[in-house]
Image (cartoon, helix red, strand yellow):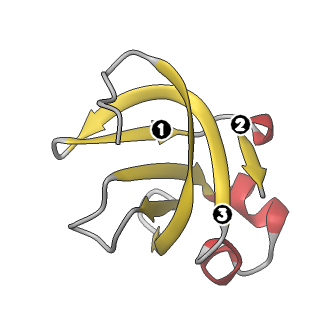
């Protein structure tokens, strides 16, 4: 995997290995590469946006192959993208 640097806008392609929902912030966290905490990369999708795709986003996104475009940030020493718009997400 190419080293990803904070502040870069990139396209990330991969398989979602695990989906976690946090009710406190109403966000879905998608883990790529492996299950948490061994994942390579994560994507945070606001609940209202995730529910556009399915009534049950946890089931819908898990095991999907996705392309995500966005700004890289670092959380817990791992790169992540926080999705703001539907156009940042593509399924393949």
Residue found at the very far left of the displayed protein: 77
- Front residue of 51/14: it is 14
Q: Which residue is mark 2?
A: 88
Q: Is residue 83 above or below residue 37?
A: above
**48 displayed left or right of 68:** right
Residue 70 location, quadrant = top right
Q: Outermost residue toward the top? A: 7
- For residue 6, what is the image quadrant? top left
Residue 81 is labelled as: 1
In primary-sequence order, the first of circles 2 and 1 is 1
Q: Is residue 15 left or right of residue 24?
A: right
Q: Is residue 2 above or below residue 24?
A: above
Query: Crowdedness of circle 3 by 10 Å Cα count: few (<14), some, many (20+)?
Result: some
Residue 87 percent across, percent down from the top left: 80, 36
Q: Which mark is residue 65?
A: 3
Q: CA distance from mark 3 to mark 1?
A: 16 Å
Choose between 64 and 50: the one closer to the eye.
64
Q: Which residue is found at the position 28% from the left and 70% from the top?
A: 36
């Amino acid at each position: 995997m190419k080293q990803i640097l904070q502040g870069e806008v990139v396209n990330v392609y991969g398989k979602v290995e695990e989906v976690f929902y946090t009710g406190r912030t109403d966000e879905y966290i998608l883990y790529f590469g492996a299950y948490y905490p061994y994942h390579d990369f994560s994507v945070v999708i606001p609940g209202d946006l995730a529910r556009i795709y399915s009534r049950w986003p946890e089931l819908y996104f898990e095991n999907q192959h996705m392309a995500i475009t966005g700004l890289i940030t670092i959380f817990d020493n791992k790169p992540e993208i926080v999705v703001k718009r539907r156009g940042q997400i593509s399924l393949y």
